[in-house]
Image (tube, rainbow, N blue to C red):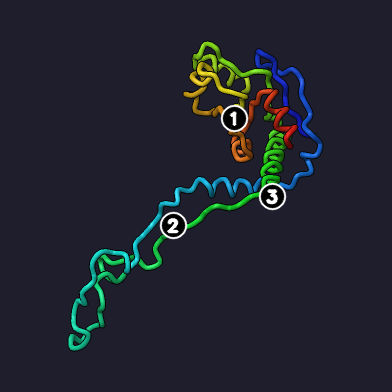
Amino acid sequence: MSKALILNEKFENAGDVVLPAKYAEINSHNLYLYVKSYLASLRANTARAKGRSEVRGGGRKPKAQKGSGGARWGSLRSPLFVGGGQAFGPQKRNYVQKINKKQKVLALSFALNAQGENGSLYTVDSIKVESGKTKDAVAVMSKLNQRDVLIVVDSIDENTYLAFRNIKNCYMIEKQEVNAYLISAYHSVLIEKSVLEALTKEA
């Protein structure tokens, strides 16, 4: 059974909270489908090449149909020529991969459960650095002793944002931004207790 480790105000271990047992029964394929859909939605979809009918020029037949002994050219904008159109070039397409709302919830639950099983899911009452200093935020990170951390808070205040924004191995988001991809992409997750309760309640 997976657990979230409870940290006190000094970010020291103060017990644990058990995640819902139904999380363990979720199929990992839900996470796979969500990540696939999420990454597809990030694609720029700007690759575009012009075909022979779209390239400027090539209106005049370059040489006579017969008599030259060579091939029969109809246009200098054929893919055979420099400056011609591209044959089978990339075109804009729809990369969207639909995923059901229930599957999104299942994927998030599975990701939380996986972090809990690895012992890398931490919860704390509040995550705030009132000084706004990066060294204070680094001190918090060093107590977790993790390679990288996703920090999930209910709302980000300016000083806390300033403290954490320049640390390369952590990323801070608000509750409405959390998703299964981010939860699974980081080696550990530090989440406020109110946010964790809301996420487990929604699931």
Q: x, y (%) of residue 47?
A: 40, 54
Mark 3 or mark 2, earlier in chain: 3
Residue 137, located in which quarter of the rendered image? Answer: top right
Q: Which residue is mark 1?
A: 150
47 left or right of 58? right
Q: x, y (%) of residue 135?
A: 51, 15
Mark 3 and mark 1 residues within 8 Å of each other at the beta carbon: no
Q: Which residue is mark 3?
A: 29
Q: Amino acid at mark 2?
A: Lys
Helix, strand or loop under label 3:
helix
Residue 13, located in which quarter of the rendered image? Answer: top right
* Label 3 Cα neighbours within 10 Å, binned few <14 / some 14-19 / many ≥20: few
Residue 58's tag is none
Helix, strand or loop under label 1:
strand
Q: Amino acid at mark 3?
A: His
Q: x, y (%) of residue 163?
A: 50, 18
The alpha-carbon separation of the residues under discs 3 and 2 comes to: 29 Å
The alpha-carbon separation of the residues under discs 3 and 1 comes to: 23 Å
What is the quadrant of the N terminus in the image?
top right
Residue 92's tag is 2
For this rendering, which residue is in front, 175 or 184?
175
Tell us which disc is closer to us: 2 or 1.
2
* Label 1 Cα neighbours within 10 Å, binned few <14 / some 14-19 / many ≥20: many
Q: Amino acid at mark 1?
A: Leu
Is residue 156 placed above or below 51 in the rendered structure? above
What is the quadrant of the C terminus in the image?
top right
Mark 3 or mark 1, earlier in chain: 3
Residue drawn at the location 70% of the way across and 45% of the way down: 102
Residue drawn at the location 67% of the way across and 13% of the way down: 9
193 left or right of 48? right
The alpha-carbon separation of the residues under discs 2 and 1 comes to: 34 Å
Is residue 163 placed above or below 51 in the rendered structure? above
